[in-house]
Image (spheres, rainbow, N blue to C red):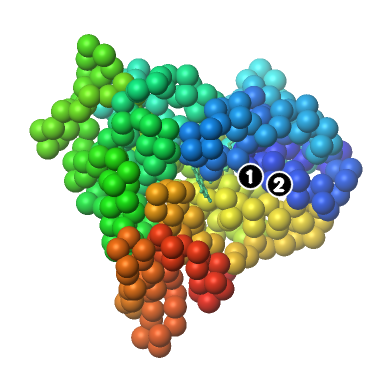
Amino acid sequence: MTEQHPIVIVGTGLAGYSLAREIRKQDKDARIVMVTADDGVSYSKPMLSTGLTKGKDAEGLAQAGTETMAEQLNLELRTFTTVTGIDTEGHRLLLGDDSLSYSKLVLAWGADVIRLTIPGDGQERVFPINDLGDYRVFRKALKPGSRVAIMGAGLIGCEFANDLRNGGYEVEVIAPSDAVMPSLLPAVAADAVQQEMEALGVNFHLETLVERIEPAETGVTLFLANGEKLQADIVISAVGLRPRIQLARAAGIDTGRGIKVNRLLETSAQDVYALGDCAEVDGHVLLYVLPLMACARALAKTLTGVPTEVTYGTMPVMVKTPCCPAAVCPPPSDAEGYWETEQDGSHVKTLFKNADGEVLGFAVTGRFALEKQALSKIVPPIHS
Ligand code: FAD
């Protein structure tokens, strides 16, 4: 009965658009409606942290407008349309006062930025950056000579720090960890990246936190837990993301850290699927592009009549810190073994080996980063 209704995809990020593209490879005519809370402009989110280095502002990073996307993908695109609920029984998406019936529904609505509640009156100078709209606002606020403080030394914080230095800005990075990218890089590789970033002029304040942000004569003052005070014109908050699960949970769909789906990308509700940053696929929340592309390829087949489970190859993460490029393929969290390291200054190649000498993971920095492809071939996929 519901088959005359369209496939509805919520979200026009990389997950939503990749899925639409993959569906079109399988079926030129299937009726598809895409719904997004934003302007639906197509862009590559990873490029946001390379804008200054590449000399591109938000408009320069936009790849295609909605008319082009709707025409290319032969679908209906509803922009500035926020989903407010899901009636899973009735196969209806709730859009405020309006609603939209679906035959199949795909949730590709991403993740929310974690917002710290930091005391003080300087909050209006704090900018999270998780989409092109955020980036547009941030770039408007960034003036020649701006001093920028970044809260968070993860992948995104480090990439923005490098990019801002390349753009000639003063950059301070504050984080509670004792190393950069602690959940991604082994210590020896993290140290190498940090060293090169410091040589580039990034100032790190690790093992401490921002306790208060107050307006100053110009910009804001950040009061750190270690007693330091920093002056900045702009504060970037890069302290992590949380998959968007609230609306799914309210609709009775199983959620964990993300919206729980199996390898077919099926949620616990009939005809409702999820992929991308909002999804927890077979127990894993993977906030990266390669996993969502694999999911898009598999789900497109499922939605067009050939049920297909997602499988992943080896998925190295590239760290876009041009002062010290890095690539990493972390070993499984429960793997037993040891890191074997070859190092020449900040050029590091470290391999995680098990007792049989099998390579289960790696991290490479500097000139060794060139070996990432070759190493990816010998590392077994983790989530296969
Ligand atoms: P999003 O792009 O966030 O899209 C979500 C969509 O859902 C949006 O269109 C939004 O408007 C819509 N939406 C949300 N809620 C609603 C609602 N209620 N109703 C309607 N629409 C809604 N990954 C890598 O693999 N390599 C990298 O080098 C890398 N670099 C990165 C650099 C930065 C600065 C950032 C922020 C991320 C980076 N990532 C990287 C991560 C990667 O970009 C993301 O995993 C990926 O883009 C997520 O895509 P998505 O489509 O799931 O979510």
Q: Residue at x 39, y 26 (%)?
A: 127
**Residue 44 in picture, x, y percent from top left:** 60, 40
Outermost residue toward the right? 29
Outermost residue toward the left? 227
**Residue 280 in picture, x, y percent from top left:** 52, 52
Q: In which quarter of the image is residue 339?
A: bottom left
Label 1: which residue? Answer: 15
Q: Residue at x 32, y 69 (%)?
A: 343
Can residue 54 be seen in the rendering of this structure? yes
Q: Quadrant of residue 6?
A: top right
Given contact means CB atoms under 8 Å apart, are the residues at marks 1 and 2 in contact?
Answer: yes
Indicate left or right for 135 with 106 as reference.
left
Looking at the picture, tell me which residue is in the foreground, 261 or 60.
60
Three-letter amino acid code at the position of disc 1: Ala
Secondary element at image label 1: helix
**Residue 109 in picture, x, y percent from top left:** 58, 37
Q: Which residue is drawn at 19% across and 46% down?
A: 207
